[in-house]
Amino acid sequence: MSELLTHAEYKSIADNLTLPTAGFVDGGYRPAASGATFASTNPATGETLAEIAAYGAEDVDFAVSKARESFDDSRWSKMHPSERKDVLIRLCKLMTRNQHELAVIESIDSGKTIYDCATVDIPESIHCIKWHAEAIDKLYDQVSPASDDHIAMVLREPIGVVGLVLPWNFPLLMLAWKIGPALAAGCSLVVKPAEETSLSALRLAELASEAGLPSGVLNILPGGGAEVGEPIGRHMDIDMVSFTGSTATGKRSLGYSAESNAKEVVLEMGGKNPAIVMDDAENLDRVAQHIVNGAYWNMGENCSAVSRLIVHKDVKETLCARIAHHAQQWNIGDPLNPETRMGALVSKAHFDKVCSYLGEGDVLFGGSAQDGAFVEATMVEISGNDHRLAREEIFGPILSVIEVSGLDEAISIANDTDYGLCASIFTANAKRAIRGARALRAGTVTVNSFGEGDISTPFGGYKQSGFGGRDNSVHAHDQYTQLKTIWIDLADDEDEAID
């Protein structure tokens, strides 16, 4: 865990930042061809942080051409694996050296708490890139079992030029989740950060160049979805797109692919994640802490957030009381204060969306908003699974409670959703835990805890939570590579005649 600075020290860093204002293409910052800009705003204060170049289709074409050039001339894709690893390790060292600056940029640009940025997001981003860097020269190709007259080699080759489309809730960490395996594989990248949170990606690109990443390999294109995201999705010279964001936008990416060059598309989208607590769950106070962390971490702006608490009727009252107790400790305040646990929602538009859910259901605690940017930790009880609060992805700090009488009912309600990203089950019965975990239709199921696994475990979902690949683990490399079979005939010409 990174050592925390004081509130005054973080404010001093924020006051003295030199923020990037242009996209990063072909090894350097570059204004938009149109000269257009958009404002990057601190959601906690409403202050304009920077006017950033607003890229468009012409800029996308230029960036893709430079990425293709860098891929085709092998400046990165054919570099020796150990040399690629060294570049990425140097990047990690530079990120560590600049970790406090990166944490402050992330906090003021997104509204996230400096506590989370400094202790989770930045350290995990560094660890992710380092982990994939270390895997570069340890992932072997294969030789398949063939006859004595043949050798069959199965090779992994970089897929080519990759478009990466990022969400706004974990700007730097989601960038790391994608560029770690993509750069390790040898791909060249065209990255669209979220319009709300572009600053940390632009700063990281500068550090990557300083680390020795060749020009044209990592290009960061700020701008809107229609102006940058759609041209990336439709571009004829992009080989695949990896997308993290809303389900609605992810579906559009599939359409762009079908209407252009049938590029591969990997989607990591929304969630409506259940936490099942059975009547035999041990240490309800500890369970409550996991539920609170799952529901309110990052202000609930998390695709794997606990959104539905499905709890046995015999422990509901006790558990809800313990959740209310622990939620009181999640104070709202200045995101740059390391004592703050709940920061600002990312934008006024998103704040308005989350607020539209307040006042529904039987409010057990919370239920109010502050200063046009902050929503307090909220828990409401609803009847059944048909309520709007149970069906829609809120992406805010609102937890819905649904009472059940047994495990089969709980599993049925948990699976009754369009999504299937994460789920949790709390029980002291090992057989019940394993049965429940197997029955839950989700990509990650945690037992007696809330979490997403770690860098060594694949992350992704079922149903409308996504498909096509997984982030994290060695499986993340698969989406950025192609498999090639080389079949070698060793038969003696005298033994095998050819008609």
Image: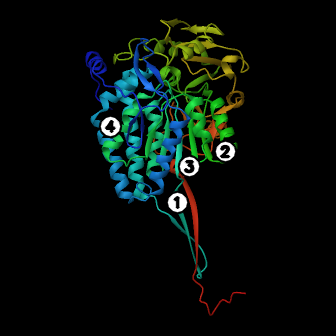
Q: Residue furthest bottom?
A: 494
Q: Which of marks 1 and 2 is nearer the N terminus?
A: 1
User: In the rendering, at what x and y percent does residue 157 appear?
Assistant: 52, 59
Q: Which of marks 3 and 4 is nearer the N terminus?
A: 4
Q: Earlier in the sequence, mark 3 or mark 2?
A: 2
**Residue plotted at (45% across, 41% down):** 219
* Separation of residues labelled 1 and 2 (CA atoms): 25 Å
Judge whether 218 appears above or below 311 on screen.
below
Residue kind at label 4, given as amino acid type: Met
Q: Name the residue under label 2.
A: 260
Q: How crowded is mark 3: few (under 14 residues within 10 Å), some or many (20 or more)?
A: many
* Separation of residues labelled 1 and 3 (CA atoms): 11 Å
Residue kind at label 1, given as amino acid type: Arg
Dot 4 lies on which element? Answer: helix
Q: In this view, does 315 lie to the left or right of 177?
A: right
Q: Mark 4 points at which residue?
A: 95
- Quarter of the figure with residue 357: top right
* Separation of residues labelled 2 and 4 (CA atoms): 37 Å
- Quarter of the figure with residue 403: top right
Q: How crowded is mark 4: few (under 14 residues within 10 Å), some or many (20 or more)?
A: many
Q: Mark 1 points at which residue?
A: 156
* Separation of residues labelled 3 and 4 (CA atoms): 25 Å
Dot 2 lies on which element? Answer: loop
